[in-house]
Image (tube, helix red, strand yellow):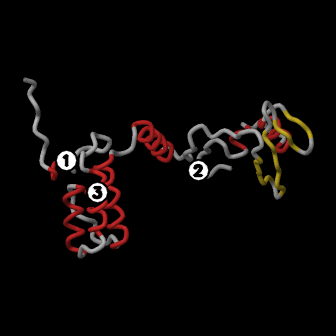
Amino acid sequence: MPRRHAQPPRSERRRRAPGGPRRRDAPESLADDLESLRNLPLKALRERWRDLYGVPCPPRISRQLLTRALAYRMQEQALGGLDAATRRRLERAQEALAEGRTPTAPGAKARPGTRLLREWQGVVHEVIVLEDSVQYQGKTWPSLSAVAREITAAHWSGPRFFGLKGVRRGQV
């Protein structure tokens, strides 16, 4: 007969790492647990913080933020945390900020029909993205970079000029 492992007590299941297996009783008990947060006194909420996060509750956190943080953590533990791709994306954004760059959305690409606006030296320039080119001032251009060169008279990355790629802080 196959050996079955006993399920850990509920208190230990709540402390598992984000993204791990889901609790079997998650949907029903989670709703009840979340609802109970509304009526808990502040002292009990702070104790709940220590149970869920394993560290003391910040001393000056508002009740509203405390309740939301607890609710998030409870849902994370019951339903699973962020998936691996989202965690990697957040790590890359953190690295970009540490390097002084502005993080960009993944795959920030302009789809056909998108209007891009950029103010340059007091003039607003509008570009419409087409399937294989862009339209600027009624003419078709091969790329955003070509339009950026036309506007600035200097070599620019078109996606960077129109805000589709991150730039270092302090630069335009």
Q: Are marks 1 and 3 in contact (CB under 8 Å)?
A: no
Judged by depth in the image, the label closer to the viewer, 1 or 2, is: 1
Marks 1/2: CA distance? Answer: 43 Å
Q: Is residue 1 above or below residue 98?
A: above
For the residue carrying disc 3, how many other residues have a C-alpha within 10 Å: few (<14), some (14-19), or many (20+)? Answer: some
Q: Are marks 1 and 2 in contact (CB under 8 Å)?
A: no
Residue 150 occupies quadrant: top right
Residue most toward the front? 1
Count of numbered badges drawn on the protein: 3
Residue beneath the point at 47% across and 40% down:
89
Residue most toward the top? 1
Judged by depth in the image, the label closer to the viewer, 1 or 3, is: 3
Residue 103 occupies quadrant: top right
Question: Which mark is first along the chain, 2 or 1?
Answer: 1
Residue 49: horizontal and vertical position, in percent? 24, 62
Q: Is residue 98 left or right of residue 24?
A: right
- Label 1, secondary structure: give it: helix
Residue beneath the point at 28% across and 51% down:
26
Residue 109: horizontal and vertical position, in percent? 66, 38
User: Circle 2 is placed at which residue position?
Assistant: 169
User: Circle 3 is placed at which residue position?
Assistant: 30
User: Circle 1 is placed at which residue position?
Assistant: 13
